[in-house]
Amino acid sequence: MQDNTTSASESRITGTRVVQIGIAAVVAILAVAAILLFSYLPDANEFNDAVREIFLVNDALTTTESIRILEILAQSGTTFSKVLASYRAIIFVLIVFATALLIACLVFLVTIITLNRRMHEIERSGIQVSSLVVSREENVVYLNNLEFKLTKAAMETLSVLAEARMDDDVLSGAEIESMVSGKPAADCEEAAGATRIKRLRDTLGNQMVSELLVKNIARRGYMLAIDKDVIKMI
């Protein structure tokens, strides 16, 4: 249990560091991209400056038509400045949106990777159970404070497995059938015990819980893959 807890803590710390580094990298890359993008955009007053230069250079333009043309150019410059300012605002919003989207994707990716690693650890070491209370009278088992209502037959099978686990025993299918039915093990079939294990798993319902809780050890038999100190029979 201690090794699994330590491994889980290390995975969380590593995942947190990866997220922090990834977020910093995403923000830095987009910040550089934004700086380069805004630096290459023309200045909002560049058009107005060009029109002002025309006014200053061409003092001879005194006719009504010429002045009208210059006024139109000046108005065009003002419009260009407003349009360029709106483009800057749109680009800024898009960059902020892209930053948030990339950070969210990074967080989700790291979360998925961490969960996959955790699931692999669980599959490799078995389910972590801090408490297993078997109530024969109520036909109920409390697994980490989660209540599972069992049939009478499933409760008998689980009780046999729990008692065997407290004695560090691994039971074959024939031995399970013998202990439940009261018959001699020589008169019981392996398939009968395997059927009881299957019915127990089906009654538990949750495939991950049932498959990892009741382990099948090749050529030996069945056992509960939990610490015997957490088992309590009532």
Image (spheres, helix red, strand yellow):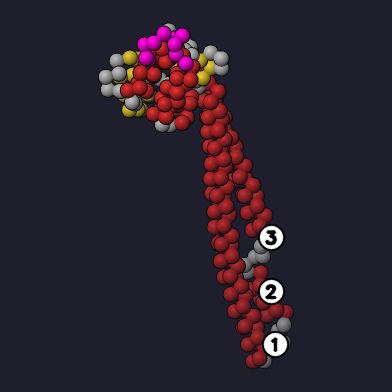
Nearer to us: label 3 or label 2: 3
Depth check: 28 or 105 in front? 105
Question: Would you name the residue on which mark 3 appears?
Answer: 40
Q: Which residues are the magenta region?
A: 180-189
Pick the front one: 167 or 53? 167
Q: Work out whether mark 1 precedes mark 3 in sequence or the reverse, and give the earlier one.
A: 3
Q: Which residue is painted at 51% across and 19% down in the image?
A: 216
Which marked residue is nearer to the observer: mark 1 or mark 2? Answer: 2
Check disc 2 and give the amino acid type: Ala
Kindly indicate the quadrant of the structure image that contains residue 148.
top left
Residue type (three-letter) at the residue carrying disc 1: Leu
Q: Given the image, on which type of amino acid does mark 3 rest?
A: Tyr
* Discs 1/3, front: 3
Q: Name the residue under label 1.
A: 61
Tell me the tag on residue 50: 2
Q: Residue at x 54, y 49 (%)?
A: 100
SS label for mark 1: loop
In this rendered view, identify the residue nearer to me: 86 or 177: 177
Q: Is mark 3 on a helix, strand or loop?
A: helix
Q: Label 1 to label 2, Cα distance in Å?
A: 16 Å
Residue 186 belongs to the span the image colors magenta:
yes
Q: Residue at x 46, y 31 (%)?
A: 207
Snapshot quadrant of residue 57: bottom right
